[in-house]
Amino acid sequence: MKALIVYESMFGNTAEIARAVADGLAGTYEVTLADAASDPSPDGVDLLVVGGPTHAFGMSRPSSRAEAAKQGSAHTGGGLREYLDASPALRGVAAATFDTRIDTRYPTGSAARKAQRRLRKLGCRLVAPAESFRVTGTEGPLLDGETDRARKWATTLGAA
């Protein structure tokens, strides 16, 4: 079985979570890990996992990526939003979403929940609720234990 993990990362935190998810799925799936800007093909995939940073209560957009660049992000090209907008129909493909977001008691929205809506419209079968992994600030780092939690979350996806 094949799994494709597509991610967008500004400061490396979401990429780190994506790698942990790949590690967690590796026992069950042949895993491909790809940046959304590389526009990886979902053809022949049994499980699609997508993730990105939460920007302005949802998925990043060109303006929020430009703002991240002012803060030192090295990310270039399109992101998860553009990847999903250009995706072909994915009828019946198992899918899951994750995001990274700042650890705060105030509402920050969720890129993962927005991505889930788009995957549903593409025909995906969601196998888990959207999952969020916390960072200490805009540039990170991840909170202690989040990569381990991502690995464990991925093993539940493999079982689903």
Image (spheres, rainbow, N blue to C red):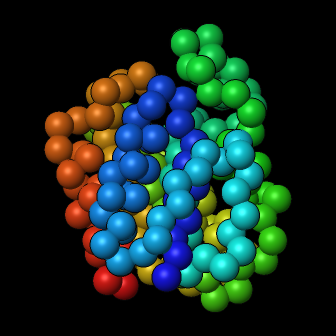
| Residue 49 visible within the image | no
Quadrant in which residue 139 is drawn: top left
Left or right for 13, reference 145: right
| Image quarter of the C terminus | bottom left
Residue at coordinates 52% horizontally, 76% vertically from top-left? Answer: 2
As drawn, 67 above or below 49 = above
Left or right for 76, reference 102: right
Q: Which percent across, then down, holds residue 99? A: 45, 49
Q: Nearer the viewer, residue 134 or 3?
A: 3
Numbered marks: total: 0
Furthest residue in direction left, as rendered: 145
Quadrant in which residue 136 is drawn: top left
As drawn, 104 above or below 28 = above
Q: Which percent across, then down, holds residue 27? A: 31, 72
Residue at coordinates 29% horizontally, 34% vertically from top-left? Answer: 142
Q: Which percent across, then down, holds residue 112? A: 51, 56
Residue at coordinates 45% horizontally, 31% vertically from top-left? Answer: 12
| Residue 4 visible within the image | yes
Q: Which percent across, then down, holds residue 145? A: 17, 44
Furthest residue in direction front, as rendered: 30
As drawn, 12 above or below 88 = above
As drawn, 18 above or below 62 = below
Left or right for 22, reference 50: left
Quadrant in which residue 156 is drawn: bottom left
